[in-house]
Amino acid sequence: MLNHTTLIIIITVIISLAAWQNKTLFNRLIFYPPAVSRGQWDRFVTHGFIHADSMHLLFNMFTLYFFGRVIEGLYRPFVFGYGFVLFYVFAIVVAMIPSYIKNKDNASYLSLGASGGVSAVLFAFILIAPWESIYLFAIVPIPAIVFAIAYVAYSIYANKRGGSNINHLAHLWGGAFGVVATIVLRPQILPHFFGALLNPFG
């Protein structure tokens, strides 16, 4: 039986590949604020299952595979065993809400990719293992908590600077959702996090 992380990856890869072959499908799934305002609210979810190119898809799915399997056990007991799936989908939706509010009248704004959900998964993992090594570009090991601080700082900076095709705002809100949802559903994770943080060699 496939775990839910692998199932999400398979579905995302299939939909991304299909969208690359079908421009009409691609345009229907991408997050486009004027279309959302006209009632196509499903775009809050569908944009998270398509990607700009193969590297975009590979990076997000590699990250999801590595960290999703670790935290899936935290959420699986909820909602008849589908807690992790709902956590991931809600993260994609919540991560996009600030961008929608900011750009709802912007006819040139587009956004796509699983980064909101992946950021939620990554930050939930950091609560569990703050000193675990995260490999930047799959090569450079960085303690998870250090990566989190640098990631947030860079995302805030890049979002304020603008001029990028990357939705840094979704990264921030996805990560925030991952932290808050994990603490709400598993309150014991907070003392665990601080205990682990204060005992890096424990």
Image: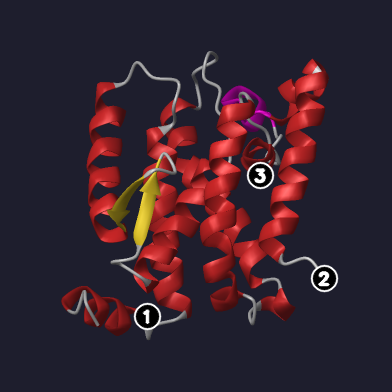
Range of the magenta residues? 30-38
On the image, numbered disc 2 is attached to which residue?
Answer: 1
Q: Which of 196 and 201 is in front in this view?
A: 201
Tell which circle, 2 or 1, labels the residue nearer the N-terminal end: 2
On the image, numbered disc 1 is attached to which residue?
Answer: 189
- Name the residue type under label 3: Val
Judge whether residue 81 is colored magenta: no
The location of residue 44, given as percent across then percent down, is 62, 41
The residue positioned 76% from the left and 48% from the top of the image is 10
Q: Give residue 89's quadrant in the image.
A: bottom right
Q: On screen, 48 above or below 65? A: above
Q: State yes or no: discs 2 and 1 in contact (Cβ < 8 Å).
A: no
Quadrant in the picture for the C terminus: bottom left
Q: State yes or no: discs 3 and 1 in contact (Cβ < 8 Å).
A: no
Question: Furthest residue to the front?
Answer: 139
Tell which circle, 3 or 1, labels the residue nearer the N-terminal end: 3
Q: Say left or right for 116 vs 175.
A: right
On the image, numbered disc 3 is attached to which residue?
Answer: 45
Tell which circle, 2 or 3, labels the residue nearer the N-terminal end: 2
